[in-house]
Amino acid sequence: MATTARISLSSGIMSTYGSYSKTMTLTQGGTLTDLDSTTGFQRRKLTSTDAKDIITMASLLVETEDGAAAGTGAAKLYVKNAGYKGVIDKSVYVSISLGTVSGTIQEISKLYGGDWMMIPVTGIDATSDVVATPETNDAVVLEFALYYQED
């Protein structure tokens, strides 16, 4: 069974713009073969402005027959700022980055309350993780999943 992502957009910004709906099947790099692995859908409550690993990429690496670590191919990352206890605060964000909490991180998004993203991710290796850094110490829940291809 294929893993798919669907999005429907409509807008009142432009009178000539109607709406559209798109569906994307999550496939392995350069093929029509479905992605074969996932971290699973997870939720995590954050309560400080400390950077936190939400997905540890090293745990996704598989060993080759000779015992060496093999990277992964195509990957799609989903993250949503779900607010906390039903409260969606659109005035504060959680920064989503790639890197490590103790090293260099590269911000890829700021998710305000209720915002979500789904993006292709490359470079799954033992030195880069998905890192979340809340703007404030107020509690916030992130929902997230990584769908990926094992080499």
Image (cartoon, grey):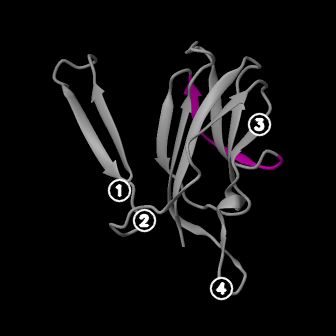
- Residue under label 2: 28
Q: Disc 2 or 1, which lies upstream in sequence?
A: 1
Q: Nearer the viewer, mark 3 or mark 1?
A: 1
Q: Is residue 65 above or below residue 55?
A: below
Residue 2 numbered mark, or none? 1
Q: Disc 3 or 2, which lies upstream in sequence?
A: 2
Q: Is residue 96 left or right of residue 8?
A: right
- Dots 3 and 1: beta carbons under 8 Å? no
Which range is magenta? 102-112
- Residue 119 appears at what percent x and percent y? 48, 46
Q: Residue furthest bottom?
A: 66
Q: Going 39% across and 55% down the picture, which residue do you hit? A: 26
Q: Amino acid at mark 1?
A: Ala
Q: Amino acid at mark 2?
A: Gln
Q: Determine the CA span between mark 4 and mark 1.
A: 28 Å
Q: Going 71% across and 80% down the picture, which residue do you hit? A: 68
Q: Determine the CA span between mark 2 and mark 1.
A: 11 Å
Q: Disc 4 or 1, which lies upstream in sequence?
A: 1
Q: Residue furthest left?
A: 16
Q: Going 71% across and 20% down the picture, which residue do you hit? A: 139
In this view, the residue in front, 143 or 31, is 143
Q: Disc 3 or 1, which lies upstream in sequence?
A: 1
Q: Determine the CA span between mark 3 and mark 2.
A: 30 Å
Identify the secondary structure beneath mark 2: loop
Q: Determine the CA span between mark 3 and mark 4.
A: 35 Å
